[in-house]
Amino acid sequence: MEFKKLVEFDKEFKKLSKKYHSLKLDFEDLKKVLEIDPKLSIFWENWVKRISWLWENVKYDIFKIKKFRCASISGNSKDSWLRIIYTYIEKENKIEFQAIEFIEIYHKNNKTNHDIDRIKKKYSD
């Protein structure tokens, strides 16, 4: 499985990883889980929401991980979670997954919702 990142995601990730030192390791753990279950339906079904149905002409399913736990963030409230927006790209046979592309990462306290324009710009027909 190939993992890709949008340029904007990479910038957000670098900024957050300076503040939250465990983020890189926590993110590697997430990628291991995504290799097994790209929709996270088995492991985190209550923490992941499919959001691509909100827009017309979006090519792929877009998912929001609502409760991504970063060990460097103390506490157990909603203020201690990050959000990650991603998509996965299936091969033509729809049995195998070709790639997962990370779109956006943010802390719920700093941003109330995902960037709709970024998703539309990159994934709409």
Image: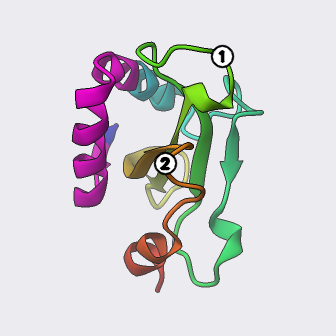
SS class of the residue under badge 2? loop
Q: Is residue 6 magenta?
A: yes
Q: Which residue is mark 1?
A: 76
Residue 110 location, x and y as percent? Answer: 49, 48
Q: Which residues are magenta?
A: 3-28
Residue 23, image quadrant: top left
Q: Is residue 46 magenta?
A: no
> Residue visible at 67% across and 23% down?
43
Residue 96 location, x and y as percent? Answer: 48, 44
> Residue visible at 70% across and 34% down?
47
- Does residue 92 appear left or right of residue 20 in this picture? right
SS class of the residue under badge 1? loop
> Residue visible at 37% across and 26% down?
27
**Callout 1 touching callout 2 (CB < 8 Å):** no
Asked if residue 13 is positioned above or below residue 121 in the image, the reply reads above
Give the label on residue 110, or none.
Answer: 2
Task: State which tag comes first along the sequence, 1 or 2.
Answer: 1
Asked if residue 104 is positioned above or below residue 40 in the image, the reply reads below
Asked if residue 27 is positioned above or below residue 122 in the image, the reply reads above
Quarter containing the N terminus: top left
Secondary structure mostly taken by the magenta-highlighted segment of the chain? helix
> Residue visible at 33% across and 16% down?
22
Residue 48 location, x and y as percent? Answer: 67, 40
What's under tag 2, amino acid-wise?
A: Asn
